Amino acid sequence: MGRRIILLGPPGAGKGTQAKWLVEKTGLLHLSTGDLLRDEVARRTELGMNARAFMDRGDLVPDDVIIEMIRGKIGDAEGFILDGFPRTVAQAEALARITHVDHVLYIALDREQVIARLTSRRVCRDCGWITNILSNDAATDGACRDCGGELYQRDDDRREVIENRFDVYIGATAPLIAYYGKLGILSEVDGNQSPEAVLVQILAVVEAA
Ligand code: AP5
Ligand code: MG
């Protein structure tokens, strides 16, 4: 099994959802730069205070900050699931200097689906469980199904910020599809199907090699 995995895709494609399930199946280390940054913001660290304005607008935090933050986390880990990193060609080139990558799973989703999903997403403040008020298993009482924690709406899940995040994705991140395609390690998965069906396709790729 290829153990060094990148989940690539627009905001709302399901990277976090799939990463959590993949961790349960594979035991690999999950590294989400978005989650790491939100933790820095919550702890009011200097990094978090500097990153916050970028995140609130839906812009990317500067490459050097992100690369420095992730470098130590990847370290010499034997396997990982990268979620939301790399997000620019410069970040991909920096990653290539740190370690090699086995698979890039590109989860595709169009703009309208992205907006619909993210305006209705809820996340558990305590355990990070991701859900959606439109889905069948949604908690209707505002409590997390897993741990009973409070479900909240991310600060950047406002429509105008979501639209900017999608535009930023198209401009800065989508070029990575060609970048990793040329390296022969990219597989595309249709994100507009059930999360279970997406997982099956991802596992078929990572378990094949
Ligand atoms: P980040 O936290 O990475 O946000 P994102 O890329 O915008 O992605 P999301 O977390 O919004 O979506 P997701 O793909 O994880 O979808 P999810 O599984 O939650 O980054 C936030 C900010 O931090 C950035 O804007 C930037 O400022 C900064 N940042 C982070 N990394 C950076 C980097 N490398 N460089 C620079 N800046 C960086 O699912 C979404 C919703 O859909 C949920 O409600 C879920 O329940 C639902 N759902 C999931 N799958 C399905 C499905 N198959 N069918 C129906 N619904 C589904
Ligand atoms: Mg996410």
Image (spheres, rainbow, N blue to C red):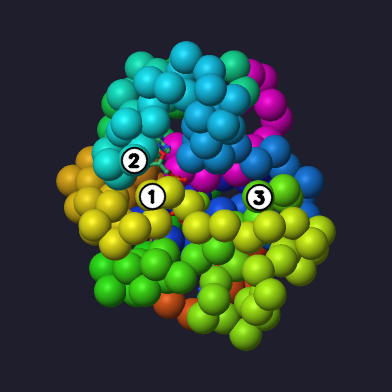
Q: Residue at x 47, y 24 (%)?
A: 48
Q: Residue at x 39, y 31 (%)?
A: 52
Question: What secondary structure is found at the residue carrying circle 3?
Answer: loop
Q: Which residue is mark 3?
A: 125
Q: Where are the magenta residues, as a range?
A: 74-85
Q: Amino acid at mark 1?
A: Asp
Q: Amino acid at mark 2?
A: Asp
Side of 71 where 62 appears, left or right: left
Mark 2 vs 3: CB contact within 8 A: no
Q: Amino acid at mark 3?
A: Arg
Q: Residue at x 66, y 20 (%)?
A: 76
Q: Residue 141: x and y, percent?
A: 68, 75
Q: Which residue is mark 1?
A: 156
Q: Residue at x 39, y 67 (%)?
A: 119
Q: Residue 137: x and y, percent?
A: 67, 80
* Residue 3 is inside the magenta segment: no
Please tell me the numbered disc located at residue 56. Answer: 2
- Check the image and report above or below for 68 versus 6: above
- Who is closer to the viewer here, 17 or 140? 140
Q: Residues within 10 Å of mark 3 (few under 14, many from 20)?
A: some
- Label 2, label 3: how many angstroms apart (C-alpha)? 18 Å
- Label 1, label 3: how many angstroms apart (C-alpha)? 15 Å
Work out whether mark 2 precedes mark 3 in sequence or the reverse, and give the earlier one. 2
From where the camera sits, is residue 79 visible? yes
Question: What secondary structure is found at the residue carrying circle 2?
Answer: helix
Work out whether mark 1 precedes mark 3 in sequence or the reverse, and give the earlier one. 3
- Who is closer to the viewer here, 73 or 126? 126
- Label 1, label 2: how many angstroms apart (C-alpha)? 6 Å
Work out whether mark 1 precedes mark 2 in sequence or the reverse, and give the earlier one. 2
Question: What secondary structure is found at the residue carrying circle 1?
Answer: loop
* Residue 76 is inside the magenta segment: yes
Side of 177 where 209 appears, left or right: right
